[in-house]
């Protein structure tokens, strides 16, 4: 079965510092991987996806993620954190080949400290 | 519409009652998805439609849960004989199946269900 794991429930980072939110995956076949963000009282918003091609994927709000096949990881990164980046971040993987539904991790709460 | 619309935004009901939650997807999106999110958890997949048919309903927890999408647009999630454990935020999402938007789910704000 397809699944993702987010090993950290909480990540704290100082404003202006680089941030990393970790995600590892377990899939049969080629992975389709995604990051979504959830701000308080708002719906989930798409950040970026990896389907194929360049291992470094760039997305919304200056975020990027690096696909690493040997480590089965897809960590989310940003060179310089903003206080407004504080939110709940979810990694997701597409279901089996031919399906379009996503399976989400448990989420990581990012807090950027001014 | 411009986004995915879900109604009601909040629903409080008593144990044993029947509940319907409605989702109006983005116009033209062929695929529609229902998820459930409990406090402190990630979204849990329930069911996924391609057009009018359920392509995958393996996430429905039991036969009290049912969803329909009769005309390939609006969908209704139906919960019979509600239990306290059904309390959660029910999320709907839609996506196209082709082009750059394929596999990118757009979510609604959710319907918060509280079963007393």
Image (cartoon, coloured by chain):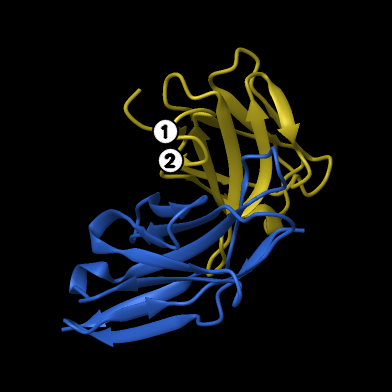
Chain colours: A blue, B yellow
Residue A20 in sight here? yes
In the picture as drawn, the residue positioned furthest to the top comes out as B71
Residue A56 pos. (x, y %): 39, 63
Q: Is residue B24 above or below residue A109?
A: above
Residue B96 pos. (x, y %): 49, 29
Q: Is residue A55 above or below residue B5?
A: below
Whether labels 1 and 2 share one chain: yes
Q: Residues within 10 Å of mark 1 (few under 14, many from 20)?
A: many
Identify the disc placed on residue A75.
Answer: none
Q: Are marks 1 and 2 in contact (CB under 8 Å)?
A: yes
**Residue B3 placement, left or right of B34:** left
Residue B98 pos. (x, y %): 51, 28
* Chain of the residue on which disc 1 is drawn: B
Residue carrying label 1: B4
- Which one is in front, B86 or A111? A111
Determine the secondary structure under disc 1: loop
- Which one is in front, B116 or B111? B111
**Quadrant of the rendered image containing residue A62:** bottom left
Mark nearer the N terminus (1 vs 2): 1
Residue under the image location 69 percent in, 37 percent down: A98
Label 1 vs label 2: CA separation? 5 Å
Determine the secondary structure under disc 2: loop
- Which one is in front, A7 or A38? A7
Residue under the image location 47 percent in, 36 percent down: B8
Quadrant (top left, top right, bottom left, bottom right) of the C terminus of chain B? bottom right
Residue B28 pos. (x, y %): 45, 19
Residue carrying label 2: B108
**Residue A94 placement, left or right of A89:** right
Residue B116 in sight here? no
Residue under the image location 34 percent in, 64 percent down: A64
Quadrant (top left, top right, bottom left, bottom right) of the N terminus of chain B? top left
* Chain of the residue on which disc 2 is drawn: B
């Amino acid at each position: 079965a397809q699944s993702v794991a987010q090993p950290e429930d909480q990540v704290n980072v100082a404003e202006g510092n680089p941030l990393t939110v970790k995600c590892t995956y377990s899939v049969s076949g080629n992975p389709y991987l995604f990051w979504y963000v959830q701000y308080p009282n708002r719906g989930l918003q798409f950040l970026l996806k990896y389907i194929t091609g360049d291992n470094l994927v760039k997305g919304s709000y200056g975020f990027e993620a690096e696909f690493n096949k040997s480590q089965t990881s897809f960590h989310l990164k940003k060179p310089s954190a903003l206080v407004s980046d504080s939110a709940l971040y979810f990694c997701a993987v597409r279901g089996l080949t031919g399906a379009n539904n996503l399976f989400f991790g448990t989420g990581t709460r990012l807090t950027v400290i001014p | 519409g411009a986004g995915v619309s879900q109604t009601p935004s909040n629903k409080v009901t008593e144990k044993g009652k029947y509940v319907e939650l409605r989702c109006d997807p983005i116009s033209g999106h062929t695929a529609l998805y229902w998820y459930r999110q409990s406090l402190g958890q990630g979204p849990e997949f329930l069911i996924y439609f391609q057009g009018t048919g359920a392509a995958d309903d393996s996430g429905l927890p039991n036969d009290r849960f049912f969803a329909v999408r009769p005309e390939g647009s609006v969908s209704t999630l139906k919960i019979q004989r509600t239990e306290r454990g059904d309390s959660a935020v029910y999320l709907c999402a839609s996506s196209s199946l082709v082009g750059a938007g394929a596999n990118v789910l757009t979510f609604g704000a959710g319907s918060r269900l509280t079963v007393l």
